[in-house]
């Protein structure tokens, strides 16, 4: 079966894209909450449906994409993303508006990506990282803006050293990256303002 037949974009780009955008905004506004994704598409492996849904909902010709090694090495994935988003695929993570990470354990350090600047903190990278599950694994306690008291989320897997990197990232505010965790059909976010502690 050809790639053109085996894969597809969002079933209803406007409606599904808006739904996924709302889910992401809710997740960023309320760190630790798990929001659903609309996955009416078929993406080429190793691009997960969740990553594809967000990429197709967010990226465009003005929002360059960076792909981790697992994704960048797939011609099918690169072609799919270019066709459905119109976005440039960049090799330098510093130039990306969004970064797609399929292999969470091998994700580069957060400081590798664009952190924005004091004048333009919004020009930082939003990292979209695939995880296996948002209900089991390393349990995280979250505090900060958008959280009443504290929130908790469990993430599997959890990359070694990432908790410390998130603390360093938070200290850069208003600069810094936002990390979005994408499970099979849901999303949670750890924005730059969130204090993350393993419990």
Image (tube, rainbow, N blue to C red):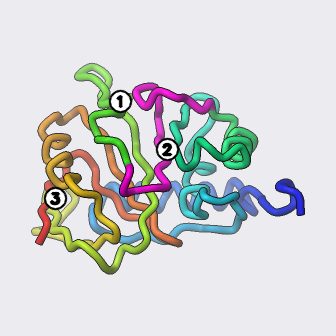
Q: Is residue 187 left or right of residue 178?
A: right
Label 2, residues with CA under 10 Å away: few <14, some 14-19, many ≥20: some
State whether residue 17 is above or below residue 183.
above
What x and y, as percent, mark residue 57?
A: 59, 51
Q: Is residue 199 left or right of residue 69?
A: left
What x and y, as percent, mark residue 179?
A: 34, 50
CB under 8 Å between discs 2 and 3: no
In terms of depth relative to the viewer, which is nearer, 91 or 184? 91
Which residue occupies the extreme bottom position in the image? 136
Front of the two marks 2 and 3: 2
- Residue depicted at 12% across the width and 39% down the height: 171
User: Residue 7, labelled with which disc?
Assistant: none
- Residue depicted at 54% across the width and 67% down the height: 37
User: Residue 196, labelled with which disc?
Assistant: 3
Q: Is residue 93 magenta?
A: yes
Q: Which residues are magenta?
A: 88-106
Label 1, residues with CA under 10 Å away: few <14, some 14-19, many ≥20: many
The answer for how far apart the CA atoms under marks 1 and 3 are is 21 Å
Q: Which residue is mark 1?
A: 114
Q: Which residue is mark 2?
A: 68
Give whichever of discs 2 and 1 has the lower sequence position: 2
The picture quadrant where one finds residue 104 is bottom left
In terms of depth relative to the viewer, which is nearer, 170 or 131? 131
| Element type at mark 1 | loop
Front of the two marks 2 and 1: 2
State whether residue 195 is above or below residue 66.
below
| Element type at mark 3 | strand
Q: Is residue 100 left or right of residue 115?
A: right
């Amino acid at each position: 079966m050809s790639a053109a037949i085996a894969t597809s974009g969002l079933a209803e780009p406007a409606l599904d894209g808006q739904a996924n955008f709302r889910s992401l905004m809710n997740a960023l506004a309320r760190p630790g909450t798990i929001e659903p994704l609309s996955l009416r598409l078929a993406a080429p492996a190793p691009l997960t449906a969740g990553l594809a849904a967000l990429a197709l909902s967010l990226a465009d010709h003005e929002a360059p994409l960076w792909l981790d090694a697992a994704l960048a090495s797939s011609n099918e994935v690169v072609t799919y993303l270019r066709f459905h988003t119109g976005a440039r695929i960049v090799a330098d993570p510093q130039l990306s508006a969004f970064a797609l990470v399929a292999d969470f354990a091998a994700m580069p350090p957060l400081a590798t990506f664009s952190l924005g600047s004091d004048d333009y903190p919004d020009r930082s990278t939003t990292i979209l990282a695939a995880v296996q599950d948002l209900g089991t694994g390393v349990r995280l306690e979250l505090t900060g803006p958008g959280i009443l008291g504290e929130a908790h989320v469990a993430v599997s897997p959890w990359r070694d050293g990432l908790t410390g990197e998130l603390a360093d990232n938070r200290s850069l505010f208003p600069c810094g990256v936002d990390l979005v965790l994408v499970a099979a059909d849901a999303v949670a976010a750890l924005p730059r303002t969130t204090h993350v502690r393993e419990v």
